[in-house]
Amino acid sequence: STFSAQLSFALAAMDYEVGLLDIDICGPSIPKMLGLEGQGIHKSNLGWSPVYADSNLGVISIGSMLSNPDQAIIWRGARKTELIKGFLKEVYWEELDFLVVDTPPGTSDEQISIAQFLKEAGINGAIIVTTPQQVSLIDVRKGVNFCKTVGIEVLGVVENMSRLYQPLTDAKFVRPAGTGEHIDVTEWALQYISERAPDLLGLMACSEVFDCSGGGASKMCQEMGVPFLGKVPLDPQLCKAAEQGRSCFEDQNCLVSARALKSIIENLIPRIVGEDGA
Amino acid sequence: MESGGDGDIPENANEHCPGPQSESAGKSDACEGCPNQQICATAPKGPDSDLIPIAERMATVKHKILVLSGKGGVGKSTFSAQLSFALAAMDYQVGLLDIDICGPSIPKMLGLEGQEIHQSNLGWSPVYVESNLGVMSIGFMLPNPDDAVIWRGPRKNGLIKQFLKDVYWGELDFLVVDAPPGTSDEHISIVQCLQATGIDGAIIVTTPQQVSLIDVRKEVSFCKKVGIKVLGVVENMSGLCQQLADVKFLKPSETGKHTDVTDWALQYIRDQAPELLNMMAYSEVFDSSGGGALKMCHEMGVPFLGKVPLDPQLCKAAEEGRSCFEDQTCQVSASALKSIVENLIPKRTAENGA
C-alpha cells in the first residue's frame, strides 16, 4: 500500500489524472497513506465521488465509509465482491490516465473478482511487491502464476525493505547491561565519535535485515521470466511519510527511498503508456 | 455500515429477504434478482452437521490458540512457528494448523518443505517436525510450490473444515492456528467451527507502524464481536539491534552514489575509537513515537505481551525452518520471544489447571 500510494503521488506530480482504488476491504490502509483520514465519500447524481488528495488524485476506499475506524469488517468473500463491484459501477472517476488498484495479500475473492470485472475493459498489468525474504518470494511466485492463469501481464516486481540505510548519526547506541537489558549510551557515543573519530559522522550505516544471499527478487524474476523493477530500501523516513500521508518525493529526508522509487516509476511508465507517452 | 454475522440480512438484499439461514433462502419469490440469490440457494442452512465430527477430533485437544494479524508481513507465521517450537521444547504435545490457504508459510518455517500428508485409517496424519510437534498446511498438498491457489471463500472454508474433521491430531496440549491477515472467510470459519469446543483465545501480531495498529484495533473488535478472548498483542520488528562490526558503512557522494567504505571504517574505529566495538547500534525503523502497540493495548484494554526486535538472525532461522531458541546467534530475539511465551503459558495452564 505504501508503494501504491507513492506511485499515485508520483503519477499525479507528473500531471497525470490518477485514481487510486483500495480493494483491501478488511484492512484499508490507503486513506491514511494519502492523508485522507476522516474524510467521507459524497454522492452526486453522477455517482459516488472519490475523495481528492489533489485535484488530479482521487481515492476510493471502504476506509472512507466507516464511521468508526476501529470497526472490523467481518465479511465473507461474496459480500466483499459485491462492494468491489459497487466501486466499479457506482464511482464517477471522470477522465483518468491511470487507475491504480491496491489489493490485499493473496489470490482469493478480491483478486479473482477484480480480474473478472475489469477483463473487458482491459488491465494493463500487475506490479508485485515483495521483501527479500524467501517466504515472501515463494508467494510472489504464486502471484506471478496467478497473473499467468488469469491472463494479466506482470509489469514487474518491486523488492521493498531491501536494506536499512540511515545516517550513522540517526542510530542509537546501546550497551548490554549483563542482565539482558540494554543501556542507552547514545549521547556518550556521539560525543566519543566527535572527539576520536569525526570522519564517521558523515557516513551512512547500512544493514541487511532480510538475508539476500538467495539472490532476492532479482534472481527470482530471472527464473520466472518477469521484469525486475528495482529495490527500495527500508527507510524510516519513508515510513514516516507514509504514516503522515505525504509524498516521499517532496520530503528532503527521504533521499534514498525516494530516489529508488522515482527510478522504478520512470522505468515503469513507458511500459504502460508506450514510448510516446500517450 | 455494520459488519454483520452470517445470519444477518445482508445490506444489499432485496426487501422481504427471508434471511440467509432460512430454509427458503435464495428460493423464495422475494429472492428474485437479489445479488446474493445464488449464494443463499446453495449455501448449507441450519446447524452444521460437520460440527459433530469436529467436536470428536477436538475432544483430545486441551487448548486452542488463534494467531491473528491485521496486516501481512508483520511476522505472524514466524511467531506461530517459534511459539510452537517453544511449546514443544517445554514437552507439550503441539499441533500447528496453517489456515493461510493462499500463502502457506508454515511448512518452510518448520523445515518441512517437500513433505506430504499421509492418510491412515484414523484420518490424515499431520507432518511431524518432532514427535510432539505436528503440522498441517495446504503447503503439503501442492504438487508444485509455485502453484497459486486461486480459490474463492467457500472452497477455502471447505478445506479448513476438512483440516478440522479429517486430521488425526491425537492428544494435544496445544493447537496453534496460524491465520492469514484479515477478518474474512478463514477467520469466520475457524471461529464457527471451533467455538463450540472452546477457543482459549487469540494472539494478535503487529509492527509498531500506525497503519498496522489500525488493523490490530479491527482484530480486537473482531475478537470482541465473535466472543474470543484476546490473550494479548505482540509487537514485532520493534527495532533493529546489531553489533557495529555487522554494519556496512557507506560514504554518500554528490551524484547520489554511495561508496562502500566498511573496511576503512572498521579499521578507523579499531585505531581511534575502539570502545565503540563493545556497543550495539539500535535503529528504530518504524516510528513508535505514537506509543506503539503498548499504548494501543492500554487504550483497548487488552494485554500487551511484549516486543520482539528485528533480528536478521531470527529471519535466518525462520527461513531455514529452525527454532530460534536453539540458535546462539538469535540472542536478542530469542530472549524476547521466550519472555513472551513464558508470560503466556501460565495464563493458560494455571487457569485451566492443565
Image (cartoon, coloured by chain):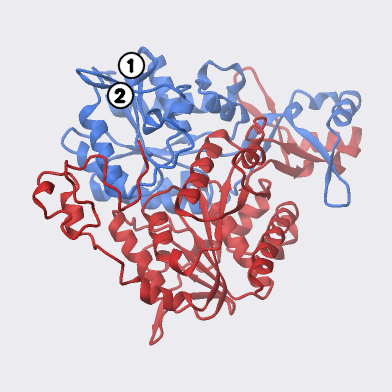
The residue sitting at 42% across, 61% down in the picture is B190
Taking the image as shown, residue A209 lies to the left or right of residue B95, namely: right
Classify mark 2: helix, strand or loop.
strand
Q: Nearer the viewer, residue B250 or B237?
A: B237
Query: In the depicted view, which residue is nearer to us: B16 or A232?
Result: B16
> What color does chain A have in the rendering?
blue
Indicate which disc, 2 or 1, sits on the residue closer to the N terminus.
1
From this view, report whether residue A212 is shown above or below residue B281.
below
Note the chain letter of the red one: B
Residue A113, compared with residue B169, is above or below; it is above
Q: Which of the numbered marks, if any, corresponds to residue A16?
A: 1
Question: Do the residues under discs 2 and 1 have CB atoms within 8 angstroms?
Answer: yes
Q: Which residue is mark 2?
A: A98
Residue at 82 percent of width and 39 percent of height = A174
From this view, report whether residue A23 is shown above or below residue A112.
Answer: above
Q: Position of residue B109 (x, y in %)?
A: 55, 61
Query: Horizontal and vertical percent for residue B344?
Result: 67, 60
- Give the alpha-carbon distance from disc 2 to disc 1, as whole Å: 7 Å
Q: Secondary structure at mark 1?
A: loop
Task: State whether residue B142 appears in this view.
Answer: no
